[in-house]
Image (cartoon, helix red, strand yellow):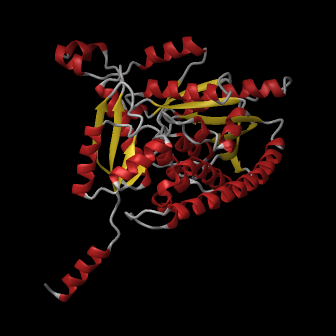
Amino acid sequence: MSKFSRKLQKLHDTAPKQETAVLVSVIRQNQSEQETEEHLDELAFLTETLGVKAVYRFTQKMEKPDIRTFVGKGKLEEIQAYVEHFGVDMVIFDDDLSPSQMKNLENELKVKVYDRSLLILDIFLKRAQTAQAKTQVELARYQYLLPRLTRMWTHLERQRGGTSTRGGAGEKEIETDKRDIRNKISLLKAKLKEIEKQGETQRKGRKGIVRVALVGYTNVGKSTLMNLITKTDILAENKLFATVDSTVRKVVLDNIPFLLSDTVGFIRKLPTHLIESFKSTLDEIREADLLVHVVDISHPSFEDHISVVNQTLREIKAGDKPVLLVFNKIDLVETMPSEEKIQEMSELELEEANYLDFQALSDAYEKKNGIKPVFMAAASGLHVEEFREALVNEVKKQHRKIYPHYLEDQVVSFDQTEEK
């Protein structure tokens, strides 16, 4: 081996390796295999968003999770054998674990154990940019981890910049950590209170102007749509929770100014205490005059995603607001072919086809909520004019409530400035 080759080999050996994880899901009654796979696909996407590679999946059918280790003894042994043989760094569960379950699992598996909430909190922590969002996430994370502190060092490593270690903290050290974390929680609460006061003052200055909030399941294209409308450059990635901070921009349509906010996406099994950790986002939604509900129509579970968002809106007391429904990413789905094309297709082709009838879908949702949905593709700009027209009409309705004697102008123009 040459000197140069040895140098390359040495660099390869000392380079930081990507952490790996196995995913675990308990299949409940009336849950189909397809649903289980979709849930695990989403968990894998979350894992990838954190920067960890999901290498294997374990599932077990149970009427209810084991009170001690969530999964049964035999399945736990399978997971343990795989983790030890392949040197896996962590085990991630698709549900929330109790403090005792997490403690028992870490003692048995000897690696980091994440549940769904902790995984999402770590992603939030990684994604947060503003002082308020960072403070909110840090507070929520410490509050969630305090009762699960037995192997706290394994969860704080990511913040401290460390890598996987397989030691354990003594009881005295754990009590010291608990005391430190309680102090941090108190300081973070005080800091957040001051930040929220500033936010309240800022929101009071918005009276007299229509407020519109983009809502939807995570990764449906809200930030892309925000960029399209405001012509700004907000982070838009094909990752879950690419946007964590609430972003507000001023837009002018048809000479009517309004504030448009992009908010953190909702997700299946997102516990209320995690939603509440984003008070600024919630306030933008709660105080909005109009919600633009963006849906990724290319996702096979888009109807379930709509239900998740609607349920979450009800939970945060925002379920009765006017909504403009936007079916995004239509360029990624197959639409109904012509009658002539259908006649030419074989029975097998028709059975295997996965077409979406936009007209039937539009009629169904218009009948349901009284507003005709919009079909578009924000990334490519397809049908953007139809979306703008629908948004103008809905904003005008809200504007008339504030200024009932407003005289409409037929000219539609666009302008925007970043809110100070």
Q: Residue furthest front?
A: 171
Q: Can residue 153 be seen in this view?
A: yes
Q: Can residue 239 be seen in this view?
A: no
Q: In this view, does 302 lie to the left or right of 85?
A: right
The front one of 240 and 383 is 240
- The x and y percentages for residue 202 are 80, 47
Q: Which residue lies furthest to the left in this view?
A: 1
Q: Residue furthest right?
A: 405
Residue at the (41%, 50%) spot, across then down: 113
Counting every numbered tag in the picture gives 0
Q: In this view, does 94 lie to the left or right of 257?
A: left
Q: In this view, does 27 lie to the left or right of 395?
A: left
Q: In this view, does 418 lie to the left or right of 293?
A: right
Residue at the (50%, 52%) spot, across then down: 122
Does 157 sit above or below residue 323? below
The front one of 188 and 216 is 188
Residue at the (64%, 59%) spot, across then down: 179
- The x and y percentages for residue 292 are 61, 31
- The x and y percentages for residue 207 are 83, 37
Instruction: Work out which quarter of the rendered image holds the N terminus and state it.
Output: bottom left
Residue at the (79%, 43%) spot, across then down: 203
The front one of 304 and 78 is 78
- The x and y percentages for residue 256 are 75, 35
